[in-house]
Image (tube, grey):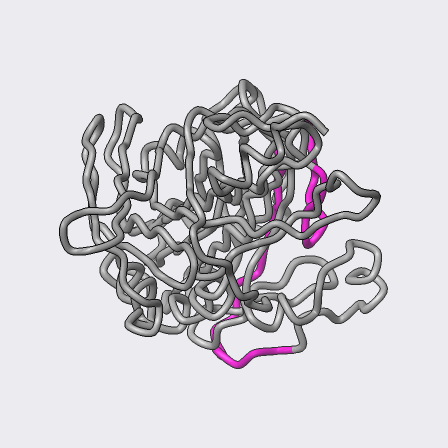
Amino acid sequence: MKARSMKKGMLVVSAKAMVGLYVTANIALFGIFGAGCTSNPIHEHPATANYELHEWGVLRIPYSSTEKPSLTTITPSHPQIEIREPVIYVHSKDPKLDYFDLEVRLNPDSVLEITKTYPEADVNGKVLRWDDIAVKYDQGIKPIVTNAKEMDSQSIDPNLVKALSTGDANTLEYKNTASKFLLYEGLMQYENAVTATPTDLENGPAVIIKNNNSYPIYTVFYCTSGSFGYVSRILAGEEKSQYLVSTNYLKDRIFIEDLMAQGFTESESSAFSSLWLEEFKWSAYFEYPSKTVFLIPIPLNKLTYRIPREEYDNIASVTATPSPDKFYRALYVLVEMLDKKMQAEINSPH
């Protein structure tokens, strides 16, 4: 991902948002919501096995430029909220686990549709299944796809596949595909309720972040104009202020250490950081019609936080057969917001 430079004086304002969601996942799972697909495994699976599942992902809320936006609201006409790369890795040294089944059930109250699965799964409404996935124990990274046409037909970026294929996870084989993960994509609704307001305190620029959710948030990271503020935890209903410092002082391992503290391996955590750290640090741009005929690029600021495991489970329920000994899940929310002065300019009459 390419980082872009940011202009000074930007403001992040985030309040309740209801927008479309795009889901990308590497996953081994069974869910809780509603009736699912019929399981038709060919191979007999063990009743128990000693293994772990590790899953991380990002819920990205891009800024809407389709209408004049409110200062506090991401409009429903927003392009799509994307839940990108929820990746589930399998870690097993138990040879009894030679095959297992995976099922994903997305919450029907918020998920609009499933748009893509990789390798191609059986999809029934908001439920998708992979039956009889083989688990390999050589730990070597095999060719990711044995059928190149399959990758082309599903629009899977080979560079993304390479970045996600960490060496310490088991290789999985499903039909004609060998992969370190499974993946799905979809559209859904999500409500953001965290605000971030820049201000000036006695010792310099700062940001005030308020968590309007009914649950705590973690690893709260705000970035604007080459500066950032970080808070490790904000409780439900709590408001915290944090001074802003240059991103030159940002530790590159901030998200690596956060994931490793939750049980992820360093290889998995590094894959996450390599894909997302620059995206969290730098402003995105959208093009807005100026008062002339030209489109002007407008920088946006970033607010990132991690939601509790229970809230992630409400979005996508994950189960595996046989059940894993441990299952770690981490979902970060990335919100793109607009500067107050630029907001006023956009809302002014043309």
| Quarter in which the C terminus is drawn | top right
| Quarter in which the N terminus is drawn | bottom right
- Measuring from the top left, give residue 3's x and y in whole percent: 55, 67
Q: Nearer the viewer, residue 172 or 250?
A: 250
Where 56 falls versus 38 (above or below)? below
Q: Quadrant of residue 128?
A: top right
Q: Nearer the viewer, residue 113 or 349?
A: 349
Magenta range is 115-142
Q: Quadrant of residue 70?
A: top right
- Measuring from the top left, give residue 312's x and y in whole percent: 40, 37
Q: Nearer the viewer, residue 9 or 98?
A: 9
Where 152 falls versus 201 (above or below)? below
Residue in the image at 27% along x and 33% along y: 210
Is residue 251 shown left or right of residue 276? left
Is residue 174 shown left or right of residue 253? right
Is residue 52 shown left or right of residue 170? left
Residue in the image at 54% along x and 70% along y: 165
Q: Nearer the viewer, residue 234 or 28?
A: 234
Residue in the image at 56% along x and 21% along y: 108
Q: Please say whether residue 139 is one of the residues in the magenta stretch.
A: yes
Q: Please say whether residue 144 is one of the residues in the magenta stretch.
A: no
Q: Report the label total.
A: 0
Residue in the image at 49% along x and 41% along y: 337
- In this view, which residue lies farthest toward the left? 202
Q: Quadrant of residue 306?
A: top left
- Measuring from the top left, give residue 262's x and y in whole percent: 26, 56
